[in-house]
Amino acid sequence: MERLKNGNFLVSFGFYELREVDILGRCLKQTILSSRMHHDWFELDNGQLLITTEDDSHPDNFVMDVSEVINYPESSDTVYQLRMREVLDTTRVAIPNVNAQGANDDKDWFHNNRSVYDVRNQSFIVSGRHQDAIVSFVQSAAELDHTLELDDINWIMGPHDNWVEAYQSKLLTPVDESGNIIADVTANLEFWNWGQHSVSIPADQPEDANLADYIIFNNGNYRSYDQALAVPASSNYSQCSRYRINRSTMTIQKVWTFGQELGSGHYGSFVGSVRDHDTTYVVNAGGICLNDEGINVGTHYGDPDNDLSLNDIYPHACVYEVLKQTKEVIWGMECSWELTPYFVYFNFKATRAPMYPESMNIYSA
């Protein structure tokens, strides 16, 4: 559920239905989708919706590698579309392991969990959890009669492991606060996005037109493609991370983080969100999996020390509002549940919104 620019809420029911409701809970509009939507949607300035969908040629395999714009609110017709398998390497190793979705690498190899449109740079930004990659595409790439090509990619954000030669020129180079290239293994363990969610575009962008900032909920799964260096859930952490990309130099810098200081007890190995506000971020670690001793064990197939012998966990979710300037937590909420099977209780996203927005449509009954 998210609030639309008109003040109403858009709520998903199952995978094929959207309902627009007002603050009184009255359904104002029902939209039936032609393709299976999952995870998230993003409202464009013209009211159309950029949604994450599945490959309709594999309707039963949960192939989450398509982003499309539908002509909301007029209809659910597709007006733009991006199909990841047309241009990305479907054979690249998937971390976190896609067996978490009951599929193999030939199926849910990408796991698109959020797409946004960057108005300033006229580009589509697509997040693929199972590839530990966020990919920027030129706007024209989404035309319905177009098949994606390598030249449609502006950049790829994520660890450089296992990308074949054709993609090397698209990979962003990590740099520190002084602009020096980060070349050692810590670039993987500490710097990059791993199993990320909730890619968003903060409102306060750099003045330099070559620079663009993005924020993510960085789950942190594994933190390495080398199993000898993979970080177990009991020692891992999740973060809200803000990155700055220099499009002219193809470099990327991490400029703000919050979460590591909370420790492994707040490591969310799946789901999660971050929302940008004027002076704060709302950070949601909604997929924390603890054992009966309070130790983080991560998800099935989602962490190197999970041997699948544990079928039940103590789910936990934490939501914090954090000041950007000082990283002080000014509001927090934690939820815990009793022993339950995996994936029964979790909190996918958290938002903060006023009860009565400036723009609001209330219709008489």
Image (cartoon, grey):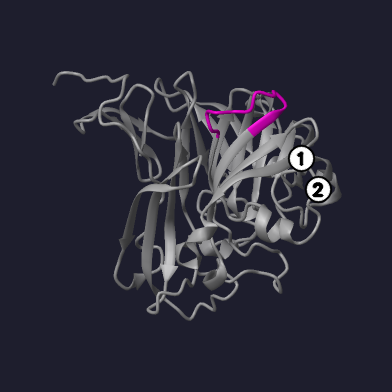
* Above-or-below relation of 23 to 265: above
Q: Which residue is mark 2?
A: 181
Q: From this view, report whether residue 53 is shown above or below residue 7.
A: below
**Which residue was labeled with disc 1?**
251
**Residue type marked 1:** Thr
| Residue appearing at x 60%, y 39% in the figure | 126
Q: Position of residue 332 (x, y in %)?
A: 35, 51
358 over 33 or under it: above or below: above
Amino acid type at image mark 2: Ile
What span is colored magenta in the figure?
A: 201-212
Query: What secondary structure is marked by label 2?
Result: loop
Residue drawn at x 32%, y 32% is 9
Q: Residue at x 65, y 53 (%)?
A: 131
Please tell me which residue lies in front, 326 or 324: 326
**Image location (x, y in percent) of residue 144:** 62, 26
In magenta stretch: residue 208 = yes
- Decide if residue 347 is in sight here: no
Q: Secondary structure at mark 1?
A: strand
Tell me if residue 270 can be seen.
yes
Local packing at callout 2 (Cα closer than 10 Å; few below 14, some 14-19, many 20+) is: some
Q: Quadrant of residue 243?
A: top right
Gap between marks 2 and 1 measured at Cα: 9 Å
